[in-house]
Amino acid sequence: LNRRLAPFGTTIFAEMSALAARTGAINLGQGFPDTDGPEEIREAAVRALRDGRGNQYPPGPGVPELRTAVAEHQLKRYGLAFDPDTEVLVTAGATEAIAASLLALLEPGDEVIALEPYYDSYAACIAMAGGTRVPVTLRPQEGPVGGAAEGRYVLDLDELRAAVTDRTRLILLNTPHNPTGTVLSRAELTAIAELAVERDLLVVTDEVYEHLVFDEAAHIPIASLPGMRERTVTIGSAGKTYSFTGWKVGWITATPELTGAVRSVKQYLTYVSSGPFQYAVAEALRLPDSYYDALRADLRAKRDLLSGGLARAGFAVYRPAGTYFVTTDIRPLGETDGFAFCRSLPERAGVVAIPNAVFYDHREEGAPFVRFAFCKRTSVLEEAVSRLRGL
Ligand code: PMP
Ligand code: GLN
């Protein structure tokens, strides 16, 4: 492995899922649902396969049906109008969208501001593009108290402003945010947008958890703020919203110029994305509101089940406003090292989790935080909670 990528040998998700498989522990590490998405959407994929739609190379930018459905989704949900022919690009999951966007938009040496803790592929893709990452740390608003921390993670806007230099090319955002579950507020997004306009920066925003928001939290795409549509690449994915993480269908929406740049790179990464699944995802994007309401209600109940169980087991819990992850602080358990904790957890309690430190450059900032996924069947979460009780 070349020197730039040497630090990224194996992802934490592969490592921890292998640990779960080896020990038979309940895997609350890697974020994937243990029940598949809607039957009718699976049937749509089967129909596409049978009818010979997409079994040969689909069009490079994605099949028109899916590009149109993505454009309709952005318009209906957020009032954002995109031309399906020039402003939508289908990718092999959000992962390819992230890679292709960074490879397309960065010159070697360009700086990228990323909110820390950041999803692991950001660091690797910035490195692939020869960029330099500049982390701005999200911190818990209130120190965790006893077993019941309730504060959210917040962005220090002064720190963000101070991170911008003459080399800064873009800000890489993620909201709702993995791993903290934070949903950036309108005030935070407005400040980021104003900074981007003032310093003429691009924004690449990973919004794969856009529909997984709870209670009074609302997802706001930064592209909808003044001055942002023309400088933003917005990334979405069917994996999270429709519980088909194995299908690897994602997309970007952006101006024709930005979309064209990302498309140029995509051509040489995967050329095209998986055909029949694109037709099925086009149908998924048109599911009625009741689908999204039910998904949120289900995950909200699971969030509360797992958060409550973790708090009773002695963790300080940062109850997430979005995503299907809950971040905890292990210090109330008398622990300080999330890595060591996660490596021993399968043996101690038969559960696998992810040490948030892997998502930090400032490892010491993330050391005591551990992430658990709650996109699992209720019975699985109940069993995990009962196992953790014995810690
Ligand atoms: N971004 C974030 C923040 C994620 O959590 C994930 C999924 N783990 C991805 C991107 C990747 O999405 P996809 O599976 O569509 O490639
Ligand atoms: N996005 C999921 C997570 O954060 C899975 C990531 C992966 O396996 N690369 O857990």
Image: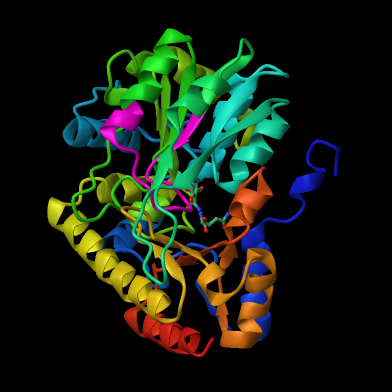
Front-most of residues 51 and 221: 221
Does the image show residue 100?
Answer: yes
For the C terminus, which image quadrant? Answer: bottom right
Q: What x and y, as percent, mark residue 227? A: 32, 13
- Tell whether position 261 is magenta: no
Residue depicted at x 20% and y 55% = 215
Q: How many marks?
A: 0
Percent of width and height locating residue 127: 71, 33
In percent of width and height, residue 345 lies at 61, 79
Would residue 133 appear left or right of 201 to someone viewing this image? right
Image spot of residue 70 (x, y percent): 30, 35
Give me the residue at 55% from left, 28% from top: 101
Viewer can see residue 53: no
Q: Is residue 88 above or below residue 344?
A: above
Q: Which residues are magenta?
A: 172-189
Magenta span: chief secondary structure: loop
Q: Is residue 374 left or right of residue 113?
A: left
Scheme of colours in the image: rainbow
179 is within the stretch colored magenta: yes
Is the N terminus in the top left, top right, bottom left or bottom right quadrant? top right
Q: Is residue 361 above or below residue 171?
A: below
Task: Identify the residue shown where x is 23% and y is 43%.
Answer: 218
Residue 191 drawn above or below residue 316: above
Q: Is residue 309 above or below residue 162?
A: below
Quadrant in which residue 362 is drawn:
top right
Residue drawn at point x = 28 percent, y = 49 percent: 211
